[in-house]
Image: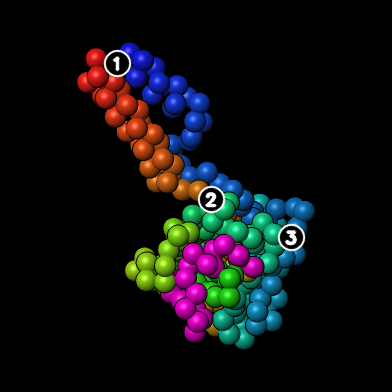
Amino acid sequence: MKRLIVGLVTLTLTSGIDLSEGASIYTETFSPPLSTSWNDKFGSPLVIEPSEGNPDYYLFGSTETGRVRAYTTSTQFTGNWAAAGIAAISYDVRNLSTNGFSFQTSLSLYGGGGGWGYPAGHAWIQPDDGWTTIVAPFDPTWTVQQAEAAGWWNQTTSEHPFSEVVQDIYELDVYIYQSNRHFGIDNVGSTVPEPSTLALLAMSAFGLLAYGWRRRRAV
Ligand SMILES: [Ca+2]
């Protein structure tokens, strides 16, 4: 039994897993040197503003001629997300409209011949909400049905499973849906969230317990 406890403590210490929060793989903070890898699919200019940027700089835009689809094909957000262990994308959004109107936002991923969106309930962001964090969690092994059951939606007519798309991401989009709004986007990040690391640790601990129990039974 003593050996079992030593084993568990050793496992916890050597695994180096931070159990307090998910581990960030990459976060776009829009701090200098300024990234120019974000553009709008519909042609509205996106600029990097140097203040009130949660912290530092942030991406500013307006939907004066309609909705905005801010997208990036930056290498930090493309490639095989399943192999990288990415299981959540998050971003901060802020409503800077002076007319008091709210807007809706969502996230989209494109790759592997398909596209999947995460509308986050098409959350309404109000001008006095400040910076609001939108988190889009996922399991890279999802089928079409599993992704839809979790609130994601298939954006292409072809039925490319979620698992196929996240293995070959080439573009990440943030949508702002309503026109005549001003908005800020910041801290677009990919993470390995806590539940998967906890589950891994729990499985290891259970394995050690079972091993110790079997040894004791054998004596
Ligand atoms: Ca920032």
Q: Which residues are magenta?
A: 152-170
Query: Is residue 204 rendered to the left or right of residue 186?
Result: left
Residue 43 is tagged as: none
Q: Residues within 10 Å of mark 2 (few under 14, many from 20)?
A: some
Instruction: Indicate yes or no: mark 1 CB to ligand 1 under 8 Å.
Output: no
For label 1, the residue is: 1
Please state, as top left, top right, bottom left or bottom right, where the C terminus lies in the image.
Answer: top left
Q: Helix or strand or loop: what does disc 1 sit on?
A: loop
Please state, as top left, top right, bottom left or bottom right, where the N terminus lies in the image.
Answer: top left
Furthest residue in direction left, as rendered: 217
Q: In this orientation, which residue lies closer to the viewer: 29 or 14?
A: 14
Q: Nearer the viewer, mark 3 or mark 1?
A: 1
Q: Helix or strand or loop: what does disc 2 sit on?
A: loop
Q: Are marks 3 and 1 in contact (CB under 8 Å)?
A: no
Residue 35 is tagged as: 3
Could you give the CA–CA distance between mark 2 and mark 3, rounded to whole angstroms?
24 Å
